[in-house]
Image: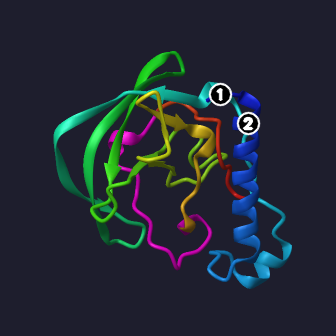
Amino acid sequence: MNDPDDWRAALEKQRDQKDSYLRGHPHSPLRADERETFDGLNYYDIDLDYRYVLEMDAGDDPERIKIETTTDGSQEYFTVGQFSFELGGAERSLVAYRPPDDERRLWLPFRDATSGESTYGAGRYLDLNTEQDREDGRWVVDFNEAYSPFCAYSDAYECPLVPPTNWLEVPVEAGEKYPY
């Protein structure tokens, strides 16, 4: 990150784009009547303290696992590593997953002490792109980009549930709030 103002502006633009998508795109998870009155998602204030540049402790051989979904199904992912960071005065960690059909994307689902209070109860997600979310060879894990999956807005979507290994006991007051 070269300039905090550029970083903040990029996050604000990303949030505006998501609001526009939810408001007007034909594939928005919001019902047509909800789109008419939708004036944007609620977010925590952007906070640089929730942005980390981390090494990933990669496993030797990715393990293929099944993760349960909101519709009593399951989806397959590979466990590819773990990120460790300090949050709430203690060392925390999140397991990183990769979908079998996309080697460029890492998925970091998490639940925290805000889940079911000020954020979606089933948890939130972070997506990392192997080509974009890197800084000096390390990964950018920015909780300001945490988002609720589409199943938070519509039962028509099947979303993977956050594995217990990625439940944090502390609040992550960054990213999307819920309900919108």
Q: Label 1: which residue?
A: 2
Residue drawn at (78%, 82%) of the image: 33
Q: Nearer the viewer, residue 90 or 144?
A: 144
The stretch of residues the image draws in magenta is: 151-168
Image quarter where the N terminus lies is: top right
The spot of residue 95 in percent (x, y) is 34, 40
Determine whether label 1 and label 2 are within 8 Å by CB.
Answer: yes
Image quarter where the C terminus lies is: bottom right
- Per the picture, the main secondary structure of the magenta-coloured stretch is loop
Q: Viewed as shown, does residue 141 lie left or right of 116?
A: left
Element type at mark 2: helix
Q: Is residue 69 above or below residue 58?
A: below
Residue drawn at (63%, 24%) of the image: 49
Q: Label 2: which residue?
A: 6
- Residue 70, quarter of the rendered image: bottom left
Q: Nearer the viewer, residue 118 or 31?
A: 31
Dot 2 alpha-carbon crowd within 10 angstroms: few under 14, some 14 to 19, many 20 or more: few
- Residue 150, quarter of the rendered image: bottom right
- Residue 144, quarter of the rendered image: top right
Q: Amino acid at mark 1?
A: Asn
Q: Amino acid at mark 2?
A: Asp
